[in-house]
Image (cartoon, grey):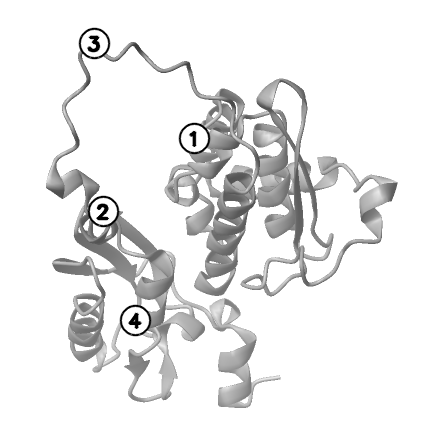
Amino acid sequence: MSTRLDELVQELGQADRQERIELLIDLARELPPLPDRLAGSRDESHRVPECQSPVFLFVEPAESGRIRLYADAPAEAPTVRGFVALLVAGLDGATPAEVANLPDDILDRSGVREILGMQRISGLYGILRRLRALAAQLPQPESPAKMPADTPSADPPSAASSDPSTAAASTPDPEALIAALRTVTDPELHVNVIDLGLVYGIQTQGHEVHVEMTLTSPACPAGPQMIRDAVAALEKVEGVTKAHVKLVMNPPWSPDRMTDAARDELGIF
């Protein structure tokens, strides 16, 4: 990750919740407009499909093996636009390798996960994946000249490090974790815990997953069963050996956390 992006992520993560929202809104205001030559290219080939809001990304090669990053996101979604602006400010002028190796923990380190619902978070993961894919398609800087044949070589990678299935298992896919939690429903409302906004956070540590989840009411009798269901669903995800679900009541749940899909199911308009 570039030094500039790391500094921005750290600044955002150290702010309290309200300051973090205000910083994202400030960043949203500072997102540069697309160049005229790209303004007409806001089409499906440049859109991030996982985002509810229309987000468009453009990554181009620049001089000295660097990249130029351009993006557009609607002002009507200021927190998403602010996150996009943070990536542009931190990655414009970075190397393709720095962009291609963006870590998913940006969302945790920046504290963005704490202020957005899981539907939005899923879209932000989509932005990170799209940026990595676009950067990987760019020409990479030339490799150093080969060493003479008699130069001792490094030990070959072990079978564990070169086995793609092992590498994948060490980092459970965030999208798969969210999808698993969508199978867990509130038995009284018959809506999944993601769309209800009951999931406050998901963190991975190696093969283990830690989830913070709340209930629509502290007295909800279905709480223990929902936690057991969540643990069972998460431990079925590839790469997860142990799931921990912690019940939290602060901040209290409110209907504002529900997605539009949940509102439709419950008939709330």
- Dividing the picture into quadrants, the one containing residue 48 is bottom right
Residue at x-position 39% and y-position 39% = 103
Query: Which circle's residue, 1 or 2, is located before the other in the chain?
Result: 1
For label 1, the residue is 14
Q: CA distance from mark 1 to mark 2?
A: 31 Å
Q: Amino acid at mark 1?
A: Gln
Residue 22, x across and y down, in percent = 61, 40
Q: In this rendering, which labeled residue sits more in front, label 1 or label 2?
A: 2
Which image quarter is the C terminus in?
bottom right
Of 157 and 134, nearer the camera is: 157
SS for dot 2: helix
For label 4, the residue is 180
Query: Which circle's residue, 4 or 3, is located before the other in the chain?
Result: 3
Q: Amino acid at mark 4?
A: Ala
On the rendered structure, is 252 left or right of 50?
left
Which image quarter is the N terminus in?
top left
Q: CA distance from mark 4 to mark 3?
A: 52 Å
Of 214 and 150, nearer the camera is: 150
Q: CA distance from mark 2 to mark 4?
A: 21 Å
For label 2, the residue is 167
Q: In this rendering, which labeled residue sits more in front, label 4 or label 1?
A: 4
Of 161 and 48, nearer the camera is: 161
Residue 209, x across and y down, in percent = 21, 55
SS for dot 4: helix
Residue at x-position 65% and y-position 58% = 47
